Structures are given as structure tokens and as C-alpha cells.
Amino acid sequence: MEQDNSEDDSVGPTEDDAQPPFPLGLSDSEAVEVLWQVRTQRRQAEPDLPDTVTRLTTPEGSIVYLVGTAHFSDSSKNDVATTIRAVQPDVVVVELCQYRVSMLKMDEKTLLKEAKDINLEKVQQAIKQNGVMSGLMQILLLKVSAHITEQLGMAPGGEFREAFKEAGKVPFCKFHLGDRPIPVTFKRAIAALSLWQKARLAWGLCFLSDPISKEDVEKCKQKDLLEQTMSEMIGEFPALHRTIVAERDIYLTHTLRQAARCVEAPPNAEKVAAVVVGVVGMGHVPGIEKNWDKELNIHEIMSVAPPSRLGWVVRNVLKGAMWGLLGYACFRASKGVGKALLSLPTVQSLFENIRTPSI
């Protein structure tokens, strides 16, 4: 698998021995041409793919095979492997960003432990990356994923790890991280909510406890379980749904279209149509299809609007109450993180600023 050095996020190869053998004594250009021919021979012209795969095309003739997955599903992992083996893509794009790339390199046991363990270090890291309010909301949303993990005994992201592994077996295949960075998503989500809405959402996430079975996961193949759980919880907050789901649909569409640009074929670097496999949660597939042929404004969904003057005044009046609520929510979510959180110098400084009148 070839490492991509373009501006798109990508991850390099890990399975060099997965490449097919070829005769010794070949020059570099001859070896490249042999590997290209091997991949071409493996690629199926009319592949028989799972029902979860949607086929999209570009004006240049490139093909994107979009695999809709459930993030906690063994059958989704099989769908991803089947698709990549059949179409031998030039590029594999997954619904991850650089802040979540670590899940590709961890084993299932480690990920399971990490997902269940929401500790002080994770709270500090979330606050450092996203700011105080966005960081705390991220921790509470992670609790949703941790709840599903605990119920199923299965770590999330198995389909992405499967895609990474299978892409490493395909000659010249590049691996792209196609999702919008988490800090941008959470900052825009928090900015879109009123203080009262933030409090209601935090309370709902804090007391999430409905049991989930493995059968429930497979029933949700038409709408990813994590996406469905989140949609049910944020359904009364249209702005939150827009930032967490709809805007990411647009971003994923953009990265998939970028990945589907023509590639250079040896030996003469001739431009040919690309074959791309996209691996995304099932809940994003309709949005990507809807946006596929539209003109997209990526800059708009990457910016965070500054708060209004009224919002600034209201936040300073009610910030103490919000801290109390979110601290209690984190305490409930992670067995004591709330207490540790309130002992952080940043938090103590904030309370001191609230108590001290401005001059």
C-alpha cells in the first residue's frame, strides 16, 4: 500500500509482506508495472457486493463504492473486507479524523478497555483540544459509545481497522482519513446550542442506561446504532443534528470526491479513472448521496462563529451553574472524574474570575 503525501489525511502501510511476489532482477519501473497489472487482474469488473454498498460515480468516470456500516457489527467488518478484495481500490477513505486515528493501531482488547475507562487524563485532553465546554460535552458523548461498548463487550471501529488491514494488501492503495476534525465538530455543536439546551443534553447523556443486545446492532444495519442512539437523544436539537450529522455528510462527500480524482497509471503516468472504497456509518450514506452532485462550501462548515455580546453576558452570569451541572454529569459518567475536574487549576481560576467583579 502506498502512503499518500497529499494534503488529505492518510495513514501509511503496515503489511509490506502482503504484496504479491514478482521476479527478481526487475528495475523499479518494471516492478511497479508488474504490481499494477497484478492489481488490475484482481479487480472485478462487475463485483457481487453486499447490500450495504452504494455505487457512486464522478464525471471523469471514477467509481466510489460506499460501504454503510454499523460501528459495532461483525458483519460490517465482513462487508468492508469483501468490497476491498473485490474492487482492489486506488484509495480507501474511512470516517475517522487524525484525532481518532489511534483506534486503527490498537488491538480489540485495548480499545475495549479504553472505551470503558473515562478518566481524568481523557477529560484534560478533551478540554485541551476542544476548550472547556466542548471538551466536557465530548466526554459526555463518549459515554454513549462507552455505554454501547459495555453492553455489547465489543469495541467500536472494527470496520475501520478491517479497512486499514485490507488496504495494506492492495498494491498502490492509499488510505485517507475522511472525517472532519473532532474539535471543529464539537466547537460548532456547542456554539449552536443555548445554555439551556446544553444543560438538557448533558442531563440526558448523563443518565443514558437502556440495555442493548447484539441483535439490536444487526437490526440497525439500515441506520448505524451509534448514529441512531445519538439521533434519538438530539432529535429535539435540530442545530446539534445539523453540526454532528448533516455537516459531516458534506465533509465526507468532499473528501470522497477528492479521493476519486484520476490517478496516474504506469508506465507513462496516463490519467485513468480511480476506484475508491468509502467506509462510513450507515447514517451518513443518505446525506452523501444527496450531496454527491452538489456544489459544496467546505470553508463554511470548518469555521466557528464568535459568540455574540448577549451570549457572552448570559454565559458569564450562568457559567457557575453550568459548571456545577456538567461537573455532576461527569461525576455520574465516570465515577469521580467530576470531583477531579473541579480541582483542576483552570476550573478553580474560572470560579475565581466569576467571584471577582471586573474593574
Image: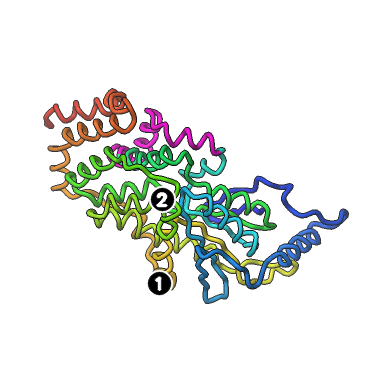
- Left or right of 122: which side holds 266? right
Residue 216, position in %: x, y?
A: 41, 50
Give the foreground label among 1 and 2. 2
Circle 2 SS class: helix
Residue 121, position in %: x, y?
A: 40, 29
* Residue type, label 1: Lys
Q: Nearer the viewer, residue 298 or 167?
A: 167
Residue 270, position in %: x, y?
A: 68, 71
Tag 1 residue: 294
Quadrant of residue 2 in the image? bottom right
> What secondary structure is the stretch in magenta mostly built from?
helix
Vertical arrangement, residue 65 with respect to residue 136, above or below: below
Looking at the image, which residue is at 63% across and 72% down? 46
Task: Residue 23: say if magenta.
Answer: no
Q: CA distance from mark 1 to mark 2?
A: 34 Å
Indicate which disc, 1 or 2, sits on the residue closer to the N terminus: 2
Q: Nearer the viewer, residue 64 or 27?
A: 64
Vertical arrangement, residue 59 with respect to residue 32, above or below: below
Residue 223, position in %: x, y?
A: 40, 58
Task: Residue 135: say if magenta.
Answer: yes
Instruction: Mark 1: give few (<14), some (14-19) or many (20+) Cα within 10 Å.
Output: few
Looking at the image, which residue is at 44% across and 63% down? 253
Q: Which mark is residue 216?
A: 2
For the magenta stretch, what is the residue range? 108-136
Q: Which mark is residue 312?
A: none
Looking at the image, which residue is at 40% across and 42% down? 148
Circle 1 SS class: loop
Looking at the image, which residue is at 23% across and 40% down? 203
* Residue type, label 2: Asp
- Left or right of 125: which side holds 22? right
